[in-house]
Image (cartoon, grey):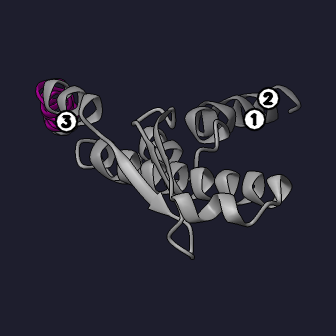
Amino acid sequence: MSRQADRDANHALRGRFDDVVSQYQRLRLGMDDIQERLSTMAVTAESPDGHVRATVGARGQLIDLRLDREIYRRGDPDELSRVILRTVEQAVAKTTGQVQEIVGEYLPPGTAAAGFMRDGNLGNLLARQDRIMREAGDGDDR
């Protein structure tokens, strides 16, 4: 009976290992695709009045800023600054969503890395380990 249980456990463990290896291989093979897509990413946002256009790259870096000539007639540099900042922030937010989407295509759902890509919370990366450490700590108190 014990040998059968060991075989069943080994078979289940082997299946899980094969699944993890498969997920890793998919992610590893997708790295070139991810890198290529991110290296060419350029996301543009436009101000509501259409006078400011900001384009950012995958890391949120500003790569182009276009100001319509009409914007200079306003004469309020503080307002112009606010419009530019809001427009760049919109472009960065759109970029973040697209980067998360691209990388998320290759991450297994429900993993810590997928959680981090979804919400940017670094705590997601260690959530499982934190839980294990808490459970191990609970055992020491008995």
The correct choice, above or below, for 51 with respect to 109 in the image is below
The percent position of residue 37, horizontal first and vertical second, equals 21, 36
State which tag comes first along the sequence, 1 or 3.
3
Q: Quadrant of residue 78?
A: bottom right
Q: CA distance from mark 2 to mark 3?
A: 31 Å
Name the one closer to the observer, 54 or 110.
Answer: 54
Q: Which residue is mark 1?
A: 134
The residue sitting at 80% across, 35% down in the picture is: 138
| CB-based contact (under 8 Å), mark 2 and mark 3 | no
Q: Main secondary structure of the magenta part?
A: helix
| SS for callout 3 | helix
Quadrant in the picture for the N terminus: top left
Q: Tell me the CA gap for discs 1 and 3.
A: 28 Å
Magenta part of the chain: 13-30
Quarter assignment of residue 106 = top left
Could you classify mark 2 by the number of other residues whose Cα lies within 10 Å: few (under 14), some (14-19), or many (20 or more)? few
**Residue drawn at (61%, 30%), measured in percent from left and top?**
129
Asked whether the beta carbons under mark 1 and mark 2 sit within 8 Å of each other, the answer is yes
Earlier in the chain: of badge 2 and badge 3, it is 3
Q: Are marks 1 and 3 in contact (CB under 8 Å)?
A: no
Residue 9: % across, % down: 23, 36
Q: Is residue 132 left or right of residue 117?
A: right
Separation of disc 1 and disc 2 at Cα?
A: 5 Å
Mark 1 vs mark 3: in front: 3
Determine if the magenta segment contains residue 24: yes
Q: Residue furthest front?
A: 73
Residue at the spot of label 3: 23
> Which amino acid type corresponds to the residue marked 3 in the rendered image?
Gln
Query: Where does residue 36 sit, x and y in percent of width and height?
Result: 18, 29
Q: Is residue 7 visible?
A: no
Which disc, if any, is residue 137? 2
Q: Is residue 58 visible?
A: yes
